Amino acid sequence: MKILVPVKRVVDPFAKVRPTPDGFGIDTTGQKFEINPFDEIAIEEAVRMRERDPAVDVTVVSIGGPECEEQLRKALAIGADRALLIETDRTYDPPSVAAELAALAADLKPDLILMGKQATDDDCNQVGQMLAAKLDWPQATFASKIERAEGSLTVTRETDTGEETLELPLPCVVTADLRLNEPRYIALPGIIKARSKPLERRPPAAQPKPRTRLIKAEAPPPRSAGRKLASVDELFAALKGKGVI
Amino acid sequence: MGRLLLVAFEPHEAAACAGFAHALGLPFDVLALSGEPDADLGAGKTMIANLSEIPPADGIAKAIAEVARDYSHIAAISSMQSKDVLARVAGLLDAAMVTDATAVQSPTIFQRPMVAGSIIATVETLCEPVVLTIRPAGFLTAQRRGVSPSEPVQVTVDSKAKRLGATNRGGARPDLTQARIVVSGGRPLRDAATFEKVIGGLADALSGAVGATRAAVDSGIAPNELQVGQTGKIVAPELYIAAGISGSTQHMAGIKDSKIIVAINKDPDAPIFEAADFGLVMDLFDAVPELERKVRG
């Protein structure tokens, strides 16, 4: 089984992020970059499948500049077999990413595309579904458990009210949610081994055609501390006064 | 001129999105996938699909895309279900998409949060159609007016994915992301039974939804789907009551658009007090049941 795991380089998800002074983007000065945490969960899951079955092959792919090699090497250190960098300096919105990945899937013919449910920078939650639509493959988003069967996957996914289980014939697209697994700590042997694994660079199949454009980025208005109250009576009266209860 | 299609997975979602429809300023129709929404929302017409169960995304997205062909905008309330399905609809229609829209400046300019709410982005759409998921808290409640005609719509659904089973732990409570009042608890609630009794009790008294911190979910006190925060659900109710919650950045990212935040915590230095409109330094096991009794009168 061939698994393709798209990986996005994102600004450190645990750092405090501000808009740039001109208000046209996110200020990443001095920030660290990481693998999008949901993509890291997807890599971990793919590597676990390979550890259970040596016939599984895991390719990670990123779209972006040469700096993305850092995240691809980390994915190889987790245990992916090979990496692919689609090298570009253009801006991609989710439909453009989905189109590029669909072209790649037509070339590599994976049985499964496993990726994060959303990136922690733009929080769009679009690419997996758009990609599945382009390929006309079934999808399971927000996956919390994946089990393999002959020619299909059984995926438990989180829903608004609980969870559901879907049976998906291969090929399919699955997007990882937080509870799918806990990614491993990367040990030194993995990092050394990653240096000798193949990392191929190729140009994009097509130029991106963005359908949305960020025109302003602002910090949200700050919330200020309110009143400390002395008793439940005071709280009840305050909420009554605001008309919310 | 454009036209909006409001997609309602559940009938009540149509009313929740009607305020957005009016803010957008385009004429709109409603596609109700299940049940019958209110007829006085100002829609041109309501199409009733009458599905007893919403099929997996690959099938239902195709069906929605068929109906949506003649519309410039397609929108639904933000939920895990709408993100699953509408992003796929956008893929089928080669559409621009705006996730979690919180404000409308024009039919091509929208606001949405990104980086877990640290940034409010203004986004311009560069083509039609435009697919959106909507956070209704930012929009006024729609004025009720007129009566829209309704017509049945035949949707053919053929999914490659097959649903083997589903659990619905929601019970009778309102959906967390759409509730007017949310009561949340953290790890101090100790165990699932205590959590349900204390937090669930106040939530039921207020006809509200129940939420939980990631710590409470990870320690098995509350089920996954109740997790509020950056990696869980983003909520924006009129009233958010946080009991025994310290206020981690992760959690605050999920609640900061709430109109009124109440913090009940026995630790006077808990960071949540810095963002709470009303703070009560008290043991939650005393304060929450007392508040519940007062609410129940």
Image (cartoon, helix red, strand yellow):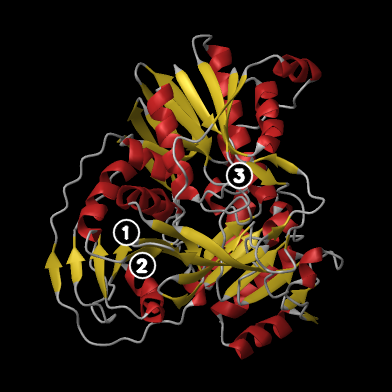
Distance of label 2 from label 1 (alpha carbons): 7 Å
Chain letter belonging to callout 1: B
Q: In front here: A84 or A114?
A: A84
Distance of label 1 from label 3 (alpha carbons): 39 Å
Is residue A90 shown left or right of residue A224?
Answer: left
Distance of label 3 from label 2 (alpha carbons): 41 Å
The reply to whether the C-beta atoms of the residues labelled 2 and 1 are less than 8 Å apart is: yes
Q: Amino acid at mark 2?
A: Glu
Is residue B75 shown left or right of residue A34?
Answer: left
Label 3: which residue?
A89
Answer whether residue A18 is visible to the viewer in this image. yes
Res B13 label: 2
Chain letter belonging to callout 2: B
Q: In front here: A87 or B268?
A: A87
User: Please, what secondary structure does the residue beneath circle 2 have?
Assistant: helix
Q: Amino acid at mark 1?
A: Phe
Q: Residue at x 40, y 74 (%)?
A: B107
Q: Amino acid at mark 3?
A: Asp
Res B9 label: 1
User: Please, what secondary structure does the residue beneath circle 1 have?
Assistant: loop
> At which x and y percent is residue A131?
40, 40
Q: Quadrant of the C terminus of chain A?
A: bottom right
Q: Residue at x 71, y 18 (%)?
A: A194
Q: Are marks 1 and 3 on the same chain?
A: no
Q: Give the number of marks.
A: 3
Q: Residues within 10 Å of mark 1 (few under 14, many from 20)?
A: many
